[in-house]
Amino acid sequence: DAGVTQSPTHLIKTRGQQVTLRCSPKSGHDTVSWYQQALGQGPQFIFQYYEEEERQRGNFPDRFSGHQFPNYSSELNVNALLLGDSALYLCASSLGSGRRTYEQYFGPGTRLTVT
Amino acid sequence: SQQGEEDPQALSIQEGENATMNCSYKTSINNLQWYRQNSGRGLVHLILIRSNEREKHSGRLRVTLDTSKKSSSLLITASRAADTASYFCATGPVGTDKLIFGTGTRLQVFP
C-alpha cells in the first residue's frame, strides 16, 4: 500500500521565480491538504483540495495556488517567491466526502530554499 | 496562526522514564490529534481523540482531553531512544476537517 509521496525532495530557487511541488495521495484517499512548516514551527494549513476543487484555504496570499487532478494527485504552485517562502512543504491525504476519519497521512515533504 | 501551544517546548529524559507533553488550544474542536516528526521530515499520526472522549490509549501512549479547559496531554510510558522526535498536537475545528497545529515539543530520550 503506497503512502503519500512528494516530489522533489529538495529545491533551491531564486527570489521572484515560480515553483511547482507535487503530491500523490495514499491509495484510496481523495482529499489532499498542503501545509507550510517554517523552521522550528508547527505546520500551517495552506489549502485543501477535494473533487478537483479548493475546498478550504488558510491565511496565505494568492501567490499560493494549487490543483488537483482526476487521479487525486495534487500540485502546489508558488509565484513570485520571497525569502520567507523558504520552508518544508508538506502534503497530507485523507478521505473526504463525509467519510471523515479526520486522520491525515503526511508525505516526507519538499524542502524549498529561496535565495 | 497557531491554534495551540505545547508545553514544555523541550524535554530531555532517560530511557525508561515517562514523558508528558501538554497542549492547549483556543476554539471548539471536533477532535484533537497528536503527531510525531523526526528530523524535520514528514509527520506520523500517533493518536486521535474525539471531543466526546476523555482518555485514549494506544500501546505506550495515553492521551487525555479536557474540553472545558481546552487542553490535552500526551503521556509516553517507558520511553526509548527511538522516541526522540518533535511532537505536535493538532486540532480539527468544528465545521472543518483541516488541522491546526501547535508549536511542538522537542523530546530527547538519552540511552
Image (cartoon, coloured by chain):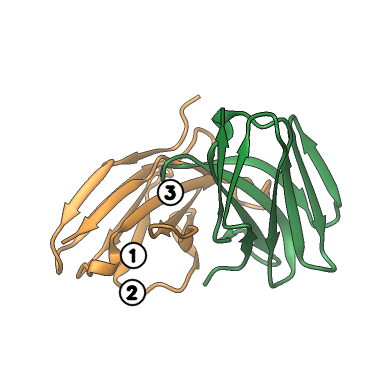
Chain colours: A orange, B green
Q: Is residue B92 left or right of residue A59?
A: right
- Work out whether B13 lies above or below B67: above
Which residue is the site of mark 3? A91
Residue type indicated by callout 3: Cys
Q: Earlier in the sequence, mark 3 or mark 1?
A: 1
- Work out whether A3 lies above or below B11: above
- Work out whether A85 lies above or below A73: below
Q: Do circles 3 and 1 both sit on a common chain?
A: yes
Which residue is the site of mark 1? A65
Image quadrant where residue B9 sits: bottom right
Q: Do circles 1 and 2 both sit on a common chain?
A: yes
Q: How many marks?
A: 3
In this orientation, which residue lies closer to the viewer: B12 or A24?
Answer: B12
* Label 1 element class: strand
Q: Position of residue B78 (x, y in %)?
A: 72, 30
Q: Chain of mark 1?
A: A
Image quadrant where residue A60 sits: bottom left
Dot 1 and dot 2 residues touching (CB under 8 Å): yes
* Label 1 environment density (alpha carbons within 10 Å; few <14, some 14–19, many ≥20): some
Q: Chain of mark 3?
A: A
- The residue that appears at 26% across and 53% down in the rendered structure is A112
In this orientation, which residue lies closer to the viewer: B62 or B106?
Answer: B106
- The residue that appears at 14% across and 69% down in the rendered structure is A16
Picture disc at residue A28: none
Distance Cα–Cα, label 3 vs label 1: 14 Å
Which residue is the site of mark 2? A62
Question: Dividing the image into 4 quarters, which one contains the C terminus of chain B?
Answer: top right
* Label 2 environment density (alpha carbons within 10 Å; few <14, some 14–19, many ≥20): few
* Label 3 element class: strand
Q: Position of residue B103 (x, y in %)?
A: 54, 61
Viewer-nearest of discs 3 and 1: 3
